[in-house]
Amino acid sequence: MTSEPIENADNAELPTSDESLPPVEPPSAKFIVQLFVVPGLIVVAIVGVWLLFGKLASAEQDWQALVADMKSSNEHRRGRGAMGLAQALAADRNRKTDGPRLATNPQVAQELSNFLAESLKSTSQEKAIIAQQDLLTQALGFMDVTEFVLPVLREAMQDTRDREVRKNAVRSVALIADRAKQRGEPLTDPGIIEELSVVSRDADSLTRSLAAYTLGLFPIDLVRQPLTVLLSDADSITRANAAIAFARHNSLDGLPVLVDVLKSAAEQKQAVPAGDVGPIATTNSLKAIRDLALLIDEATRVKIVHDVEVIASEYPEARIRFEAAQTLMKLKGK
């Protein structure tokens, strides 16, 4: 029924409810979304943006508060401060925006280094203490203020320390050295090189292999002697890391080891168990051969090409077959 507009409200006769009021219907889902959900999403987005900019704006106060916690007399508060600062460093490393970095902040580096140095004075083997040292050695790997960081990492690498703490200290030095190398400012710290040389003679093969990899990130003239020794190491992964370290500096000193790695890979007929480091050594050796391709003599090149062809066609893992095909093209000048 179409109703006419009411011109005179005083004289108009009110219609009965049956005649003019539409039936009551429950609100539709679309109506609810429009009324509540959409505005809610807008509010959430606004709050999210506000929190984001608030977080960025308060970053300075955040790390200062964490440093203050690390100085607390309360052991748990100190631990929370160290954990928080380690997490902040990791997040800061992955930040895409410009601006000051925690990694280059001298105060952060000094406080973290002092905290680790203090922790290393303890002779306790309690899990909590070791976990704290482990965390701090990893966190220092994000720092680029080497005058504070390298001395305490050298302390953490000594053979009196827990095995995991030592390994993480070596890894952190590797991260720092790699970034310095990429900046065109390679590390030359004699103390760290000396300690890495000691670690490279450790009884633990994993520790030696980490040392071999890390030494390769320093100028070759400073680490040639310990790397040359490692080319004859009893552990195949350590030998491969030393050979790859030489290749990284365009040196053929480790070529015989690389040839052996590829020969073994060519003979690999079954997939290796999960966690086996053999495929990693094979992949890195193939990449090293690509880097050295133009320097390899013809006789050695023929031998390598044969093994790489086998790997490219028969190796159990597709990823390594692809790497081998790439290396083959480089060796054949394509």
Image (cartoon, rainbow, N blue to C red):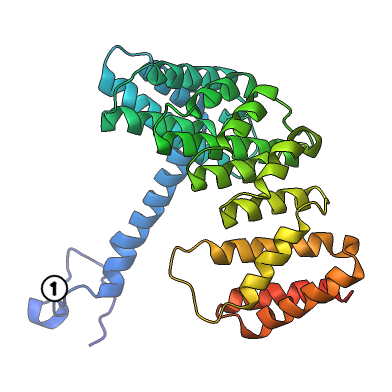
Residue 334 position in % (x across, y down): 88, 76
Residue 183 position in % (x across, y down): 75, 38
Pick the quarter of the image with the N terminus.
bottom left
Residue 256 position in % (x across, y down): 75, 60
Q: In the displayed structure, would residue 138 be above or below residue 158?
A: below
Q: In the displayed structure, would residue 4 be above or below residue 177?
A: below
Residue 77 position in % (x across, y down): 29, 22
Which residue in the structure is indicated by mark 1?
13
Q: Secondary structure at mark 1?
A: loop
Residue flagged by tag 1: what amino acid is it? Glu
Q: In the displayed structure, would residue 267 be above or below residue 149?
A: below
Q: Nearer the viewer, residue 40 or 125?
A: 125
Task: Report how many numbered discs are placed on residues in the image.
Answer: 1
Name the residue: 31% across, 27% down: 129
Q: Nearer the viewer, residue 254 or 282?
A: 254
Q: Would you identify the image quadrant in which residue 274 lies? A: bottom left
Name the residue: 57% across, 24% down: 149
